[in-house]
Amino acid sequence: MEENIFIFDTTLRDGEQSPGATMNLREKIRLARQLEQLGVDTIEAGFPAASPGDFESVRAIANELRECQVAGLCRAIKSDIDRAWEAIKDAADPRIHTFIATSDIHMRYKLRKDKEQVLEMAREAVTHAASLTSNVEFSAEDASRSDPEFLARIVELAISCGARVINIPDTVGYAQPDEFGDLIAYLLQQVPNSDQAVFSVHCHNDLGLAVANTVAAIKAGARQAEVTLCGIGERAGNAALEELVMALDVRSDVYKLTNHIRKEQLYPSCRLLSMIIGQPIPPNKSIIGDNAFAHESGIHQDGVLKNRQTYEIMAPEHVGRTTTDMVLGKHSGRHALKERLEGLGYRLSEEHVDIVFGAFKKLADRKKEVFIEDIEAVVLEEIFRLPD
Ligand code: KIV
Ligand code: ZN
């Protein structure tokens, strides 16, 4: 029987920690709705104790979404946990995600605590969180650089105190796929109560290995993957949701795993994020870049014309990309514009389509050809900036 991989999206939390990716409340809600539409299991909406703004956006998202879990991140500190709970408690399925660092370097220099003190903090934090909800996730920050025996001890303790998801982060993107897979296998085997929790991984991309490490961990038995759209996140980012989902999908013969992602929403979701944070998608980006399905060499073009599968391992339509090359210009009608908007993932009301169409016509008078980026800029300007 196929097993499920739970997709935990942290675009709104770790993703927002990416330089220049700050989002306002309205933008976060818009993106959260799209993530729900995409089918992620859990949205990590933010870090409520970090700032009043973060608290408000986590609360707004928790109150609005009904189809997925909403997680709030918090340190292993009672006041942080209470603040996170306050923000998420009205969610359909709220999750407290508490973390503490477990590597020697973090415990010594950042926390200034020894192993026993860190164990005690984890015990108190998870016990307190579990008194508020049964949906508690515990993360051992910098797990991949931690002493594996100590890691096994703290994981066992967290599960015995009520954590139902155990997250093993490669916080600094240091792990290599084989050894990271081995670490997950070791924990699943060594921790006596490991069958009472879902094991999760959270990989950073400092060496460009975040998706490879996530896949290796899944092969070893991890069943939740923490990811972000377009792989945005601290420094070089996190494992990219769209890459992980398609790696599992294209090689489903090997992995035999399912998930709840609606793959045709992948491209629209990434484009929406790119528009909101104002950062273009690099052309060579896997799955979503402009060149991801473009064929330049004569041999490749000839092969694709004969049979697309000669050089394409997935169909663009499968990930929500339209193959239309209809040009939009001043002679284009409302219908063509509406179709293009829908192809980009925007489900606008008729009234909003009218507004965008009016602005589009003015723009088309000045420009010969209107590009996707122009249309998105019009949506951003005319719809997202409308007063509430
Ligand atoms: O990278 C990391 O370790 C994190 C944790 C807080 C989960 O983001
Ligand atoms: Zn992280």
Image (cartoon, helix red, strand yellow):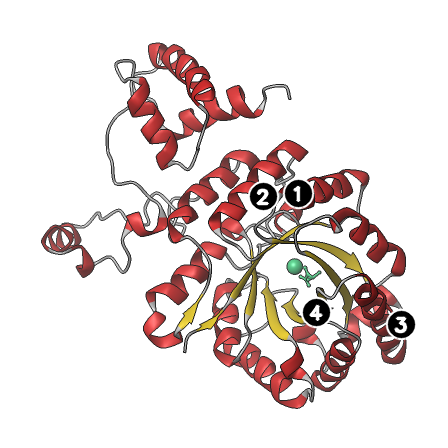
Q: Image quadrant of ligand 2?
A: bottom right
Q: Which residue is mark 3?
A: 113
Q: Which residue is mark 2?
A: 32
Sequence-first disc among 2 and 3: 2
Q: CA distance from mark 1 to mark 3?
A: 35 Å
Q: Are marks 2 and 1 in contact (CB under 8 Å)?
A: yes
Q: CA distance from mark 2 to mark 1?
A: 7 Å
* Number of the front mark, 1 or 3: 1
Q: Which residue is mark 4?
A: 142
Label 2 neighbour load within 10 Å: few <14, some 14-19, many 20+: many
**Would you identify the image quadrant in which residue 161 lies?**
bottom right
**Type of amino acid under label 1:** Ile
Q: CA distance from mark 2 to mark 3?
A: 37 Å
Q: State the SS at label 1.
A: helix
Quadrant occupied by the C terminus: top right
Residue 168 or residue 55, whichever sits in front: 55
Eyeballing the image, is 8 above or below 363? below
Residue 263, percent from left and from top: 39, 53
